[in-house]
Image (spheres, rainbow, N blue to C red):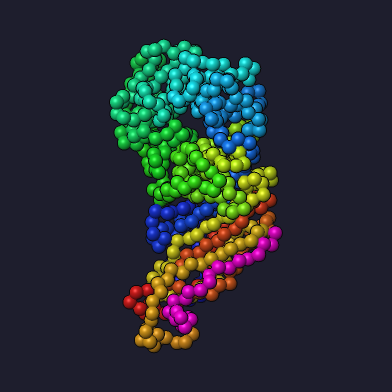
Amino acid sequence: MVVVPSQILRLGPFTGGLNKAADPVVIGDEELIECLNLELDIDGSLTARPAIQVVEEGSADVRFLIFGSVTFSGVIYLFATRNGGTYVSPDLGVNWTQAFGGSPRECKSMAVYGDTVWLPATPGSANGGISWTPAGGFVGQPTIPRGEACVVHKNRLYICPGDTATSNASRLSFSQAADFTIWPVSNFIDVQQGDGDTLNNIITYQNNLLLFKSESTYVLAYDLDPVDAVLQPVNPVIGSPGSFGVAQYENAVYCMYYNKVYEIINFNFSLINLKVPFEFDDSLPTGTTARYEDQHISIFGDRLIARYYNKTYSFNLRTRTWSEWRKTDDSSTIEWHIFGPLIRANEQEGTGVDDFYTSYSFDVSSGGYKIIKIHDGKTVADLEGLGSHTMQCIATTKDYDFADPVRYKRIFWWGADILSGNEIIADIEPITLTFAPTWDDIGDLAFEDLNTWGSPLEEIQATQTTVAADGIFNTNKLVKFLKSLRFRKANFSVQIETDGSSTEPAKIFSYIVVVSTKQLVSTQVS
């Protein structure tokens, strides 16, 4: 966009989402260098992410890993593991019952078949697998092979050993047809045995089994009997290092391979986070000890949530754009955005919106474990954190030169078309290079064209504007930021606050800039 004298320019809508891979000057006009706690809606606006709620805090410091859910007779049951034991909760994480308290069994995956939940024990579990029904409770199933991922396919239960296996780490085990208590010793397939990788993940895709090792992917196909199955490589260099690194959405499969996320359609792999390289941060937050599940992905409504160590990213599967989720309220030390795999609980059956449960991904030194709920939608009850916190939503544009890099521009004021009744903080960041000009540099300029004595050719000043809350949340408004500034390149950022509820919406539609050109760049380096 080229600037003419006193032109009103519109920046946005920002339909490209986050782009952190390229220089802020060269990314698209519709992209952002910071999209924090916002996500692109289908109407082109940026709207606040759902609140991340800490709904339960336990007395024990060792956290729960919630790995599955099932609904029987209208009751939702959550399944979790903690400290080598497996637990079930009939009330969404409020109370937990341990399986075989005196004989603990650790399970991290489950499958439902014949009105029964089947849970293989992990390779490191003290005891074997379990089955569970609401009426009969937990029943030991010592014949079920050990593993960390399982799936039901063509009336058989298939189990992958997972990345903690120390023997038969490439072995895919499967049960007798329609009877998961019988596991013949010959019912297994070794997937590229001896390559040094573990078999970590398994899903059903296009009526076949898609198998993920640490560094490769395979497809297993058969019609009636697994004895006749054909195993073929799909990708020899991309796999899934952990048991929580694969997710399915409609006709696509998503695979997290370290800091990269791939979309698999018709067995073709496409890298989807090319513009958003994941940032590595493995520091332990205040008050925490061990961290779990450094890398995992989950489907959350129409989003793919990817956690890479301390960073959480969201990929909107409808708009195909990325954003970043982060806790910004410093009044609590709980970094609730660093959570485990999200488990869908079908609380809102028939509405198309559900609640998802997970847990804080750390052992804590005090305060106990944290159960986290995220609602795929907006209700008055959904509040950030422990219910008394807020989140800051920030959208920062690229570095604009308005297609005229050889001239300085003068901004008279700028504004944002938004929906918010809370405090708004706006900031312009001029991209400046500080230098010492000579009298020859400024000799041909009029006095009104100069800035300060300390920086006559570059204006370096406070660029932030704060607009007080007005409490009007039910309509969008144009908020003007009366900041006069001279720049060659600059980016624009708006920060709005919300508690996550429907009574405090936060939306950004576009930015408006009133700007004109000034003199040509006069120095050798500007």
Where does residue 210 sit, x and y in percent of width and height?
40, 28
Q: How many marks?
A: 0
- Verify whether residue 333 appears in magenta: no
**Taking 136 as reference, is 27 left or right?**
left
Q: Residue placed at 66% from the left, 46% from the top?
A: 387
The answer to whether residue 59 is left or right of residue 248 is right
- Whether residue 101 is visible, yes or no, is yes
Q: In this view, does 186 lie above or below 415?
A: above
Relative height, residue 222 to residue 508 (above, below): above
Residue extent of the magenta highlight: 449-471
In the rendered image, residue 458 lying in the magenta stretch gets the answer yes
Nearest the viewer among 249 and 293 is: 293
Q: Is residue 513 above or below residue 332?
A: below
Q: Is residue 470 left or right of residue 276?
A: right
Query: Residue 383, position in %: x, y?
Result: 65, 46
> Does residue 299 appear in this view?
no
Image quarter in which the N terminus is found: bottom left
What residue is shown at x 34% (from left), y 21% (from top)? Answer: 190
Residue 5 vs residue 164, the one in the foreground: 164
User: Picture quarter containing residue 435?
Assistant: bottom left
Considering only vertical position in the picture, is 354 above or below 86? Answer: below
State the residue at coordinates (55%, 20%).
Answer: 103
Residue 121: x percent and y percent? 48, 23
Q: Where is residue 412 in the image (x, y as percent from the top left)?
A: 54, 74
Q: In which quarter of the image is residue 2?
A: bottom left
Q: Which residue shows up at 37% across the image and 74% down it?
A: 526
| The image quarter in which residue 101 lies | top right
Judged by its main secondary structure, the magenta piece is loop
